[in-house]
Image: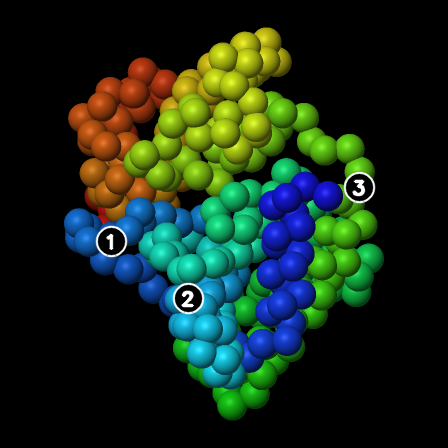
Amino acid sequence: MNETVLQMRDFLIGASNRKFQLETIDRDIDFSGDDVCTPHLHHGLEIKVLDDFQTKVAQISKEPLPPLRMVIVPSRIVHAVSQAHKSISILIENNKISGDYNHKILPMSFSPAVFADCGLMIPGIVKFLEMGILSGNFTTSFPLHMENIIQALFSAFIEILEKFSEQEPNSLVKCAVDFINRNYYRHDFFVEDVATYLGITSNYLSWIFRKETGHTVRQQLIITRLKQAELLLRSGRCLVKDAARLTGWNSAYYFSNSFHKYFGFPPSEISPSQCSQ
């Protein structure tokens, strides 16, 4: 079994025996501040479980383990990267469910149909969680329902990881693209990060990636960032400089030039009157 898969499975098994401190994020953080750690968003619901240093202290002192932090982030909500001692993330977007352990993504992703075989209807779960969080109309039973749903999701994820871990892994190029899709917003993203994740050299990654796709890993990263930025700008949720920052660009000027070259028009021409001020 892949090491990351094994670590995530073990974390989920351990989480099944712990209490949770449920948190929800129902609005964008102030991502304009320099003290925010890698602000980003996903086009899907994210479930994070964070285990901070209090657990390590409790283990040393043999005290009862503190609750795990569980953070539910609805689709397209700007939030920050966690700084927990240990963490997992389950991202449900479009027709793909992926996960990571300590920011190392799993070498496989799954369709909602796989979870349906375990009795879970993923679209209904996402709708229930997002409507409850974004409406703000929490009833006394909502947190309990939420916790029961998440526990059922974790149990299904454990079963699925064990079932699929022995199958053939995805191709190196597909894994590289998945890694880029999960990490494109990081300002310190390098081709070497992809190679390290895959356990191969940068030269071999560059060779096989160009052979199968016709372009480089760096070009794939830029294309991904530009497409994600276009989605943000067309949604009317942010200014050009904010779209650049949220998609990993260190320079708004370089972003605008790259955007113009790729799409044929500057980012400022995308419904600028609808952008939030």
Q: CA distance from mark 1 to mark 3?
A: 39 Å
Mark 1 or 2 closer to N-term?
1
Q: Which residue is mark 1?
A: 36
Residue at screen point 34% across, 64% down: 27
Q: From the viewer's perspective, is 200 left or right of 239?
A: right
Q: Is residue 67 above or below residue 263?
A: below
Q: For residue 118, what is the image quadrant?
A: bottom right
Q: Find residue 193 and report its horizontal and vertical position in percent.
A: 44, 30
Q: Nearer the viewer, mark 1 or mark 3?
A: 3
Residue neighbourhood size for the residue with mark 2, other residues' Cα within 10 Å, grouped as few (<14), some (14–19), many (≥20): some
Question: At numbered mark 2, what does the secondary structure look like: helix, strand or loop?
Answer: loop
Q: Find residue 212 and report its horizontal and vertical position in percent.
A: 61, 13
Q: Find residue 198 and report its horizontal and vertical position in percent.
A: 57, 29
Residue neighbourhood size for the residue with mark 1, other residues' Cα within 10 Å, grouped as few (<14), some (14–19), many (≥20): few
Q: Is residue 223 above or below residue 33?
A: above
Q: CA distance from mark 1 to mark 2?
A: 18 Å
Q: Which residue is mark 3?
A: 166
Q: From the viewer's perspective, is 88 left or right of 84?
A: right
- Disc 2 residue type? Asp
The answer to the question of whether label 1 and label 2 lie on touching residues, with beta carbons closer than 8 A, is no
Residue at screen point 38% across, 27% down: 190
Q: Which residue is mark 2?
A: 52
Q: Is residue 204 above or below residue 106?
A: above
Mark 1 or 3 closer to N-term?
1
Q: From the viewer's perspective, is 193 left or right of 214?
A: left
